[in-house]
Amino acid sequence: KYIDICSNSGLPNLSTCCALHRDLALANPTKMRSRLVALLASSQSHLVSGFISPALKGRVTISSSSSTSLKSSSMKELAEKVLANPKFPPEWPFSPADFERTDESDDSIFYDQPRLVYHIDDYAVRALTQYYSHHLKDGDDVLDICSSWVSHYPEEFKGGNVVGLGMNEYELSQNKQLSSYVVKDLNRDPIFPFQDESFDKVTCVVSVDYLNQPLEIFREISRVLRPGGECIISMSNRCFPTKAFRIWLQTNDLEHIFIVGSFFHYAGGFDPPSCEDISPNPGRSDPLFIVKAAKKGGD
């Protein structure tokens, strides 16, 4: 879990992270524990102060109701309060630099090699599948963006037109839950090759942090959803750091919720977004957050 802590949590004490790395390399468990305690204490102070990382300070205000002390609120309570009363700025607060990546080479090169693996642990996979079992209805037409060899839908789900849109043709061809698939690089061209109001649900599993034109993508999600249709974005703290956009790597889990909620907000066409923390074993397995919103116009 060291890599997740150091590269993805957005914690402010980089020197502690580096020292933790050194102590791990030297196999010094006593020092490692003390460093980890210091790191967690740093993160706790960071969250209590309003969980605003330097990358977001001065650009956004998160509701003060969200910055409750961790002593009286669990991570789940904090996560689910982030979008309860968000203070989104009047205009899009992000710059093009926020969506730059360490590796700006052609994404088709990076994704050329099939990866038939899960990108979250088994506990998180089961939690996501269980969540889908309550939110996908038989007959739903579903678009799975950033799709792969598995969409994590329940085995018993009997969808209508279930389409995968992803980068690797072999991976998509192995996904038995898809009716069809499209190979497309959304970072090169964010326009979906589908008609307006074609789908009841759009899903995206632990991949929103790779989309470097999120405003355009979320507008496309709104376009292809039917009124009342829902977009379900699942997120954890794992990623390919060279391909994740910059501001994601500079912020923490709670800020990730706010950032993705803002994508819905600024894209327009959605009801207010919300968050559910469905982490199966907090602190012992991968965290898992759902940020979702319905297209306006539903019953």
Image (cartoon, rainbow, N blue to C red):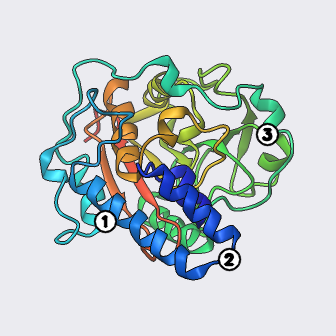
Name the mark nearer the viewer: 1 or 2: 2
Q: Nearer the viewer, residue 267 or 262?
A: 262
| Residue at numbered disc 3 | 111
Q: Quadrant of residue 207?
A: top right
- In this picture, is 243 found above or below 156? above
Q: Nearer the viewer, residue 287 or 56?
A: 56
Amino acid type shown at disc 1: Met
* Mark 1 crowd level (few <14, some 14–19, many ≥20, 10 Å Cα): some
Q: Residue at x 25, y 46 (%)?
A: 83
Determine which of the numbered discs, if any, sits on residue 27 in the image: 2
Q: Residue furthest left?
A: 65
- Give whichever of discs 2 and 3 has the lower sequence position: 2
Secondary structure category for the residue under label 1 = helix
* Mark 2 crowd level (few <14, some 14–19, many ≥20, 10 Å Cα): few
Amino acid type shown at disc 2: Ala
Where is residue 106 drawn, in percent x and y? 77, 25
* Mark 3 crowd level (few <14, some 14–19, many ≥20, 10 Å Cα): some
Kindly indicate whether the residue at mark 3 contacts the one at mark 2 (C-beta within 8 angstroms).
no
Amino acid type shown at disc 3: Tyr
How far apart are the alpha carbons under marks 2 and 3? Answer: 34 Å
Q: Residue at x 53, y 67 (%)?
A: 286
- Residue 282 located left or right of residue 249: left
Where is residue 233 drawn, in percent x and y? 47, 47
Image quadrant where one finds the N terminus:
bottom right
Determine which of the numbered discs, if any, sits on residue 75 in the image: 1
Q: Residue at x 27, y 36 (%)?
A: 271
Q: Nearer the viewer, residue 148 or 36?
A: 36
How far apart are the alpha carbons under marks 1 and 2? Answer: 30 Å
How far apart are the alpha carbons under marks 1 and 3? Answer: 33 Å
Where is residue 91 drawn, in percent x and y? 28, 17
In this view of the protein, can residue 157 be seen by the observer?
A: no
